Image (tube, rainbow, N blue to C red):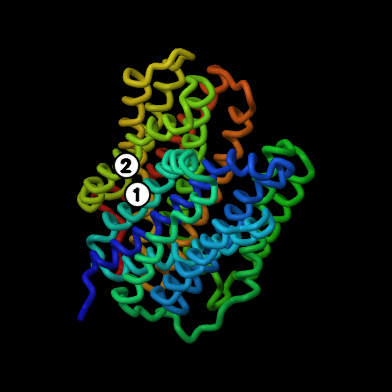
Amino acid sequence: MRTSPWVVFAIACAAVFLVAVDATIAVAAFPALRSSFAETAPATLSWVLNAYTILYAALLVPAGRLVDLHGARRLFLLGVTLFLLASAVCGMAPGLGTLIGARVVQAVGGALLSPASLTLILRSFPPGKRSAIVGLWSAAGALGAAIGPGAGAMLIQLATWRAAFLVNLPAGLLILIFAFRRLPTLPGPDRGERLDLPGIALIALGVAALTYGVVQIDSAGLLATTVLAPALAGVGLLLAYGVWARGRSGAAIDMTLFADRTYALVTVASFVFGIAFSMMFLSSFLFLFGVWGFSQGLTGLAVTPGPLVVIAVAISSGRIVARIGHRAVLVTGGVLYAFAQIWMATQVTAAPAYLTLWFPMQIVGGVAVGLLLVGLSGAAVSGLATARFGVGGAVNNAVRQLGGVFGTAVAVVLVGRGGAGVEDFRLAFQCLAALGLTTACLCLPLPGASGRLRAVG
């Protein structure tokens, strides 16, 4: 019996949602971890977060290639299984070393299932529906990332930090059962080709080194050797991969992806938006908690309307993309995003004004993020042939994740220190506005309504 595409979609989105919640719920668990491991230096404890971030970003592209070679269903099941086992170990970890090691395995599982889930839904729906479907898939991840800290804060307040990891198990087991029973077997279109192990090593080590350098900014400073040395090494390794892959058949990333002007522009725009999304997310929590004095649980509730708007917009904007093309949607989203941040930069004060300022800003910002998520994710893959779905989507996702690492680092530098005031946050909001406008400008050259990106079956 043929599985309905919507069943595949539901399973894939549930898994991505779970991974996204876990990535940010761990942030909410950090204060509780600091209390439990009071004898551990904060820089060492931060590797509970950094180990996951670095490995996840580094492995997304190799995982996408593995999906193309060995089939999406197989890699999806493996990814979910690893993620669940690692979550159980995290929740029962007897010490910090075990916890960090389990987070590494979690990152491997998450990196495998993300491109596999995207490939499953892309190959289950006809070309004409892919833009809308990819937008909803992206929105599921964004919603998970946004509600994670709020839900985590309340959960940890009722239990302990271990609950932040053990909560993955019931939902994850259901996903695994349904995936095993209902997901179709879709063999990799490149089955039989050899895996480019040297290329994968260069990509993974390059992204890992670059990400490592970025996450060190918080503790070491922008110009510290511990930041510049790994970052430059990472750039060098990625450049070395470009030389290695030039003209090579079966390379881990087919560099001809970037010969397509549209794909190249969308990828750069995804990086910029990744910075903006992550920076906005962390800055919002820091502002509400540190300046307006909201409790941790109330802060989580206060930022919830934005993600809900993202979902509503994603549902409808996918249809709009199908009619008028990606350019109008993306430019509108970038401009709206900039408007919301300029609004905050010019109007915010130390006196709480949630209903008259923050809530309306979230509505406008949610509309903007919904448009950008749908447009960028859809534009990145809608012109790719079936054999490139896994790696093409993974490259775009990895670039956005790397942007998110930069965004978090920038937010920490601007407003992460104790005592950051309204003027510091005004500067952060101004930077976010500039990032929104940059995203819009990068999308201006994309095809319009009369030259929509083609969807290759």
For the residue marked with disc 2, what is the amino acid? Val
Residue 180 location (% of width, % of height):
35, 75
Callout 1, which amino acid?
A: Ala
Q: Left or right: where does residue 312 sit relative to residue 236?
A: left
**Residue under pointer 2:** 310
Among the two numbered marks 2 and 1 on one chain, the one whose residue lies closer to the N terminus: 1
For the point 29% across and 45% down, which residue is it?
311
Residue 197: quadrant of the picture: bottom right
Tag on residue 139?
1
Spot occupied by residue 94 in the image (x, y as percentages of width and height): 65, 57
Q: Secondary structure at mark 2?
A: helix
Give the answer, above or below, for where 69 lies relative to 313.
below
Res. 408 image quadrant = top right
What's the CA distance linking mark 2 and mark 1?
7 Å
In-front residue for pair 385/155: 155
Q: Quadrant of the N terminus?
A: bottom left
Q: Is residue 23 visible?
A: yes
Horizontal and vertical percent position of residue 366: 33, 36
348, above or below 190, in the image: above
* Relative horizontal placement of residue 91, taking residue 332 as reference (left or right): right
**Residue 98's x, y, as percent?**
65, 60
Quarter occupied by the C terminus: bottom left
